[in-house]
Amino acid sequence: MKLGSVLNLLSIVLGSPSRRGETIVLSCDGERLALPVTPRKIDSTMGQNNRTVNIAARGEALVFGLPRLQTVSFESFFPHPDHEYPFVVGDYKQPTECVQLLKKWKELRQPVRVIIPSLDINLMMAIQEFNPSKRDNTGDIYYSLQLAEYPDLVTPSANNPNQVNTTTGLRGRPDAGVRGTQATMVTKAADVLDVAKKAYGKYQHWRRVAESNNLKTLAINNADKLRKLVIKE
């Protein structure tokens, strides 16, 4: 019996209606992939950063912490369309096309929407590992996938309503009530110092920030005053 006939016979046995799986959907950057074959096993972790402390005259006590990132991992395969497996529940694309899509999402470094109805999972997640492999000559591609929750962090503007300057890339400091040319110079100088500290770890690198943001005039005209603002580390 030919290999194709054996595979088709096995697919009929394994793919009976009672064993059809749920559809798991992944989407990113306007593209969508419904996994063609439901993984037989899906692992999910939902940890908590609890810690144990010692209390005098009592002993150990548990202190509740904040939740850890939820993780999901599973293994499955992308079947070749020529086999016409009856247990396919999602997109019946070429296996290489599915691999390239997941690889692209990983390299985009953007979160992926993961929907697994049976586990009540509908989360934005990051691809931690994606490992495709070939095990036989059927054209199917096997893979393992590990994902971690990607929380939506909203960074506050630190009560600073001023907009980022499109020329310098720096945010103006809040108005402290000081007026005049001198106040403007000090604000710009302080911004340059702040960026130098954040980007390079030392205030002394303010010249690099000034040059990369076309602030050569500021650096030349106010070099002495900028040096006085540098904090010795």
Image (tube, rainbow, N blue to C red):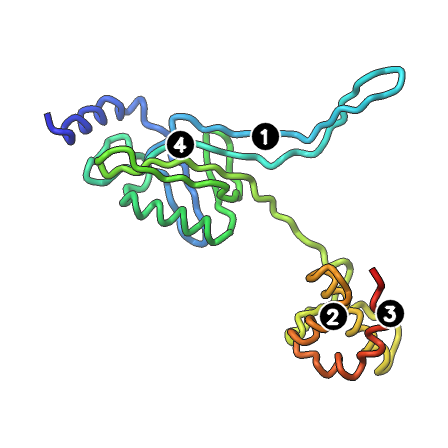
Q: Look at 54% across and 34% down and name the residue there.
A: 71
Q: Are marks 2 and 3 in contact (CB under 8 Å)?
A: no
CA gap between label 1 and label 2 equals: 44 Å
Type of the residue with mark 3: Ala
Mark closest to the chain's N terminus, 4 or 1? 1
Q: Residues within 10 Å of mark 3 (few under 14, many from 20)?
A: few
**Sequence-first tag of 1 and 2:** 1
Looking at the image, do the residues carrying marks 3 and 1 touch, with CB atoms under 8 Å apart? no
Q: Nearer the viewer, residue 2 or 165?
A: 2
Eye-nearest disc, 2 or 3: 2
Query: According to the image, label 4 marks what residue?
Result: 75
Q: Quadrant of the N terminus?
A: top left
Q: Based on the displayed image, in which of its 4 quarters is residue 192 positioned?
A: bottom right
Q: Residues within 10 Å of mark 2 (few under 14, many from 20)?
A: many
In the image, farthest residue toward the left: 1
Q: Which residue is mark 2?
A: 206
Q: For mark 2, give the secondary structure.
A: helix
Is residue 123 toward the left or the right of residue 187 in the image?
left
**Residue corresponding to mark 1:** 46
Disc 4: CA contacts within 10 A as few (<14), some (14-19) or many (>=20): some
**Cα distance between the residues tagged 4 and 2:** 50 Å
Q: Is residue 160 left or right of residue 149?
A: right
In the rendered view, does 228 fall on the left or right side of 15? Answer: right
Query: Label 2 amino acid?
Result: Trp
Quadrant in which residue 13 is drawn: top left
**Is residue 216 positioned above or below 83 on the image?**
below
Answer whether labels 4 and 2 touch (C-beta < 8 Å). Answer: no
Where is residue 155 shown, x and y percent of the image?
A: 68, 54
Q: Nearer the viewer, residue 83 or 103?
A: 103
Mark 2 and mark 3: span between their CA atoms? 23 Å
Measure the alpha-carbon separation of dots 3 and 1. Answer: 46 Å
